[in-house]
Image (tube, rainbow, N blue to C red):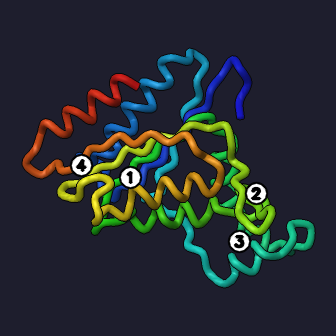
Amino acid sequence: MTTDDTTTILTIHSSGRVAGSVSRRLADRLAARLAAGHPEARVIERDVAAGVEFVDEAWIGANFTPAAERDAAQAARLAGSDALVAEVMAADTLVIGVPIYNFGVPAALKAWVDQIARAGLTFTFRDGGPVGLVTGKKAYLVVASGGTRIDSEIDFATGYMRQALRFIGIEDVTVIPADGLMGDAARLDAAEAMVEAA
């Protein structure tokens, strides 16, 4: 977390589209609006669509080895995950672009969640249950969808992202819905108005 004089905003992009992506455009605009209120703000951008490692057997083995006992290969296998965790820990605010692909999140965004959900770093277990360690942060989910309505019975993205953030300790989550965009320009106007009001 940064000092009182500065704020750090972490923007996560996950859309496979760059040009014409609604989630990217709205997330960037939201991050800019939030930064405008803090002259010393620092904005970090992470495009997970450009590539995030997937969890595999080597990653799991390294992750479950105590940090002090990891060899060089294990440390290298977790280096990408460590960097992603450090970005989250350094941020005061997260702005996450969430396009809905086939009723869920893009594979790259799921991979990002898998890389930052680390026992002992972003969550722990106490009294038989998980406790998030990433506290005191605000998150915005900019959720874009052509046909799936946010929080409908076929939306498996928004609830998943709320739970993933809650699991690591981020309870203050605001959803900006840009859903049902196919043939309904008014819904995009409403999403843009929410961004401007942030």
Q: Nearer the viewer, residue 163 or 127?
A: 127
Q: Earlier in the sequence, mark 2 or mark 3?
A: 3
Percent x, y of residue 156: 37, 64
Q: Secondary structure at mark 4?
A: loop
Q: Earlier in the sequence, mark 3 or mark 1?
A: 3
Percent x, y of residue 110: 48, 65
Q: Nearer the viewer, mark 2 or mark 3?
A: 2
Q: From the image, which quarter does the N terminus lie in?
A: top right
Type of amino acid under label 3: Arg
Instruction: Please give the name of the residue rendered at 13% of the width and 36% of the height, measured from the top-left corner.
Output: 186
**Which of the 4 quarters of the picture holds residue 53?**
bottom right
Q: Which residue is mark 1?
A: 98
Q: Which residue is mark 2?
A: 121
Asked if 5 appears above or below 88 in the picture, the reply is above
Q: Earlier in the sequence, mark 4 or mark 1?
A: 1
Instruction: Please give the name of the residue rendered at 18% of the width and 50% of the height, measured from the top-left corner.
Output: 180
Asked if 166 appears above or below 55 in the picture, the reply is above
Type of amino acid under label 1: Val
Percent x, y of residue 182: 12, 52
The numbered dot on residue 122 is none
Q: Nearer the viewer, residue 156 or 144?
A: 156
